[in-house]
Amino acid sequence: MLGGTTEARELARLAAGDDRFEGTLSLAGMTRSPAPSPLENRIGGFGGADGLADYLRRNGIDVLVDATHPFASTISANAVAAAAAAGIPCIAVLRPAWEEVPGDRWVHVPDIGSAADALGKEPRRVFLTIGRKDLAPFRDGARHSYVVRSVDPPPSDLLPPNATVIAARGPFALADEERLFRDHRIDTIVTKNSGGPATAAKLAAARNLGIPVVMVDRPPPAGPALPTVEDAWRRLVAHHAGTGALRGV
């Protein structure tokens, strides 16, 4: 299972509690202290689609589960290609994207660079919640002040100027998000459309406080995907029923 998401942790828990399955949860290694998993963990990349396909063959994997982040487009594409090369199914789970509701003030942009440009020339107090890897385009925005929130603190050389760092892992409560935005006088939020409930409170807080949100739209999915953990689990169980015992997931 390619993981790093809430969905991956939930699927790992289900698989670990079912004697029909044994599996390995593979993490990219971007988070220094990943949430505990009941499955054996593997950390690091595979060397592209060919390396992943080789790993699947060498380890006798019967099915590959892609439960990575909605913006992890490269590994998802590699998963589709590797599973096809290894002759096994790839079951992808992709949580639904957030959708605008009345009262939202979203500015849609296609990528992180466009999000930085969308901040404009007037100084802003920006809440950045885009992960540690994508901060570089904001380093040129010295006119703005930033509050950067991520699971792990970003290295100082990646931070934009005038940045305050908050290291925290969701889920986040609505009242706490509203307090955070008021305390830091946030007037713009930049986020990716990751979907899911764990960090959705920031969007409700922005709506309640009238704060605009620069929303980075998702890349196209690598292939067909299921929207929920329950759907992915049913697919795994059905696959087991149709092909016999699965040696690895």
Image (cartoon, rainbow, N blue to C red):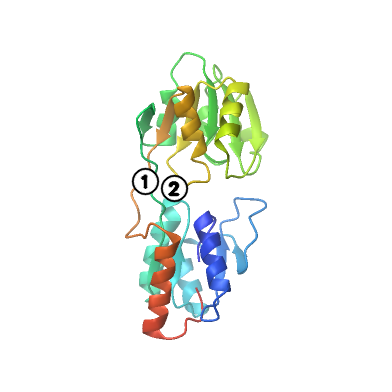
**Sequence-wise first label, 1 or 2:** 2
Query: Is residue 172 shown above or below 6?
Result: above
How many neighbours does mark 2 have within 10 angstroms: few (below 14), some (14-19), or many (20 or more)?
some
Tally the numbered discs.
2
User: At which x and y percent is residue 77?
Assistant: 39, 58
Residue beneath the point at 36% across and 46% down:
219
Q: Quadrant of residue 94?
A: bottom left
Q: Quadrant of residue 16?
A: bottom right
Residue 100 shown left or right of residue 7 in the figure: left
Q: CA distance from mark 1 to mark 2?
A: 6 Å
What residue would you read off at disc 2? 71
Q: Quadrant of residue 23?
A: bottom right
How many neighbours does mark 1 have within 10 angstroms: few (below 14), some (14-19), or many (20 or more)?
few
User: At which x and y percent is residue 189?
Assistant: 49, 28
Q: Amino acid at mark 2?
A: Phe
Question: Which element carries disc 2, helix, strand or loop?
Answer: loop
User: At which x and y percent is residue 43?
Assistant: 61, 61
Q: Residue furthest top?
A: 122
Residue beneath the point at 43% across and 24% down:
212
User: At which x and y percent is residue 163?
Assistant: 62, 26
Please tell me the numbered disc located at residue 233: none
Q: Can I make out residue 46 in this image?
A: no
Q: Can I make out residue 165 in this image?
A: yes
Do the CB atoms of the residues marked 1 and 2 lie less than 8 Å apart? yes
Residue beneath the point at 65% across and 60% down:
36
Residue 149 shown left or right of residue 86 in the figure: right
Query: Is residue 211 shown above or below 193?
Result: above
Question: Which element carries disc 1, helix, strand or loop?
Answer: loop
**229 or 93: which is nearer to us?**
229
Query: Is residue 19 shown above or below 96?
Result: below
Q: Amino acid at mark 1?
A: Pro
Please tell me the numbered disc located at residue 219: 1
